[in-house]
Image (cartoon, helix red, strand yellow):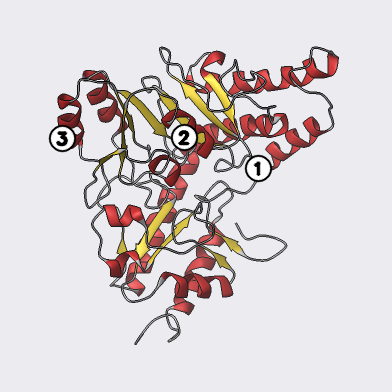
Amino acid sequence: MIDPLSKRLYLDYNATAPLRPQAKQVMMQVLEYTGNPSSIHFFGRKMHGIMEQARSRVTSIFGLKDNQCIFTASCTEANNMVLRGNVAPQIMVSATEHDSVRLALPNPKILPVSQDGVVDLNHLENFLKKNESPVLVSVMIANSETGVIQPIDDIVNICKKFGAFVHTDATQAIGRIPVNIQKIDFTTFSSHKLGGPFGCGVVLLGSSTNINPMLFGGGQERGRRAGTENIPAIAGFATALELAVSEQPQQSNQLQIWRMTLEQQMQETRPDLVVHGMKTSRLPNTICYSIPGIPQIQQLMNFDLEGVAVSSGSACSSGKVRHSHVLQAMGLSADLTSSAIRLSMGWNTKKPDIDHFMKVWHKLYKRPVISNNV
């Protein structure tokens, strides 16, 4: 997306997606209303009805009942709610999880990954086989930095074999690949990655699971998440989710074509370019690459000067550029982790965006400032 005001190219959809106009329209309508959804008068009932309608729209997409949906203020909150909800005495998380999972508890068991970023299923099975107490296993469907897709069905089957619970952070997968969560105990994701507003996330519960609250107070969300619900954001979230899921098959096909085209042209320009996770299944919209010897900060600054927004990985690190724990868990060298860049496309990416990026790419890599001896 080339922003019409700034004339800048946005390729950081895995950090956040532009707000969809349909979601914005719904939110603006709801903002015209007054009322607390917990109040019993007309105004409260109006807001409560909007919230429950949005809840039904969310659950119907996944074949769930309304009581299996808990709205939160973010996916970070949703992940913490699951991990800290006393579901099981032992927690295992994959080594490449988002920090909101990885750091939710002080000492979780770590599920290692291969050099391609795929979890070690044998390690998972052996760990569960040796444990008699219940275990909660948390593995995201798709990684936010590399786009690597995990074998979630195999993970679920192994966990069910040994009576373990499964949590998946589906934030990067929803609307980008087909997702079936029917057998998953806890699914979390956020609104703003879909083109919905900030300030809204969700926990979707499996049919036989429940969760202890992390926030206490007014008893909202059936007593599982206290705090007045953000009705405009929830309504916008439901709208964005419906659009993302309905557009997914066609959009994913187009994004994958553009991703493959970009990777080919980029490698033709820079034969030393390394695309991470290239040998396994990845999201159609994500490219994570390294060029040894060219630091992240140098590349990011030069792209920004050319009006192109890309990133060095997860956006949830206070704006800091740091070595990726994801790439380190994949066993990559410091030279590769320190030069890694992620670009990610989405619902508003157009063909001229791809062409513009390649023009900038060729221009930058002819500059001595960004590349040595080019």
Alpha carbons under labels 3 and 2: distance apart: 25 Å
Sooner in the amino-acid sequence: mark 3 or mark 2? 2
Residue type for callout 1: Arg
Tag 1 residue: 20
> From this viewpoint, is residue 278 visible?
no
Residue type for callout 2: Asn
Q: 259 or 193, which lies in front?
A: 193
Tag 2 residue: 79
Q: How many marks?
A: 3
Alpha carbons under labels 3 and 1: distance apart: 42 Å
Tag 3 residue: 122
Residue plotted at (59% across, 70% down): 307
Q: 364 or 216, which lies in front?
A: 216
Label 2, secondary structure: give it: helix
Residue 286 in percent (x, y) is at: 42, 52
| Image quadrant where one finds the N terminus | bottom right
In the figure, 32 relative to 343: above or below?
A: above
Q: Residues within 10 Å of mark 2 (few under 14, many from 20)?
A: many
Disc 3 + disc 1, Cβ < 8 Å: no
Label 3, secondary structure: give it: helix
Disc 3 + disc 2, Cβ < 8 Å: no
Q: Quadrant of residue 163?
A: top left
Residue 225 in percent (x, y) is at: 58, 24
Q: Would you say 336 lies left or right of 47 here?
A: left
Q: 327 or 227, which lies in front?
A: 227
Residue type for callout 3: Asn
> From this viewpoint, is residue 284 visible?
yes
Q: Quadrant of residue 164?
A: top left
In the figure, 46 relative to 350: above or below?
A: above
